[in-house]
Amino acid sequence: MQPIKNDRPIYLSIDASTIGVGGAVSQFGDDAKSVHECAYISFATTDTQRRWNAYQLEFLALGLCLRQYETVFLQSYLTVFTDNAVVAAIQNYKPLNNTERRLIAYISQFSMTLRYLPGRKTQSPTVCHALAKTSKKRTSLNLFHPRNYMIRSLFCL
């Protein structure tokens, strides 16, 4: 893995499942031909989140991945790859509840292009899929810890 460099385009691949959500941050290397991974992000879903629809879990994956590297991503332009068409068309989506409104409001702060790649064509499919599926082994994020106030206010029902 290499550190994230602000002078190069940043690519974020996300995936979600009922077990967990995950993402992979990648960039082109110094030779501009090889792609290298910069970070892996994975969170286990809560019991409430396990009842969410697939597109809501993808919104959650995007929001949590953006939150993890917020200081870097706010200063850069991102290209996000998702296998969910609803997330890719976020600018046309009308939120159904307050949780979705908060997630979309948070996501809209970032300069990004959302690219829909159906199914297994995502940039890092095995990585993101594995991160989303294996989050079960990790503990859930403690939303009630004082440090996680911002995350709790954004993502809790």
Image (tube, rainbow, N blue to C red):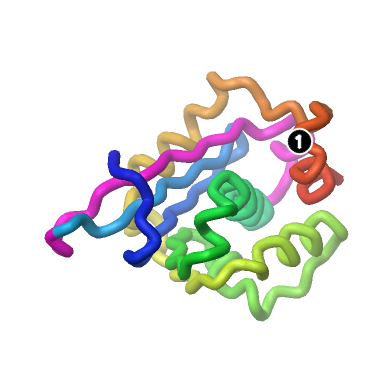
Q: Which residue shows up at 78% across the image and 50% down it? A: 154
| Residue 19, percent from left and from top | 59, 32
Q: Which residue shows up at 32% across the image and 65% down it? A: 8
Q: Quadrant of residue 74?
A: bottom right
Q: Which residues are magenta?
A: 31-54
The residue where tag 1 is placed is 148
- Left/right placement of residue 81 relative to residue 89 reads left
Image quarter (top left, top right, bottom left or bottom right) of the C terminus: top right
Q: Secondary structure at mark 1?
A: helix
Seen in the picture, residue 121 relative to 21 is either above or below; the reply is below
Comparing 127 with 149, the one in front is: 149
Is 73 one of the magenta-colored residues? no
- Left/right placement of residue 86 relative to residue 112 reads right
Q: Quadrant of residue 102?
A: bottom right
| Residue 122, percent from left and from top | 36, 57
- Residue furthest to the bottom: 92
- Within 10 Å of disc 1 (Cα), the crowding (few <14, some 14-19, many 20+) is few
Q: Which residue shows up at 72% across the image and 46% down it? A: 52
- Could you tell me how many numbered marks the image carries? 1
Seen in the picture, residue 75 relative to 92 is either above or below; the reply is above
Q: Which residue shows up at 39% across the image and 61% down it? A: 6
Image quarter (top left, top right, bottom left or bottom right) of the N terminus: top left
Q: Amino acid at mark 1?
A: Asn
Comparing 70 with 91, the one in front is: 70
Comparing 47 with 147, the one in front is: 147
Is 48 one of the magenta-colored residues? yes
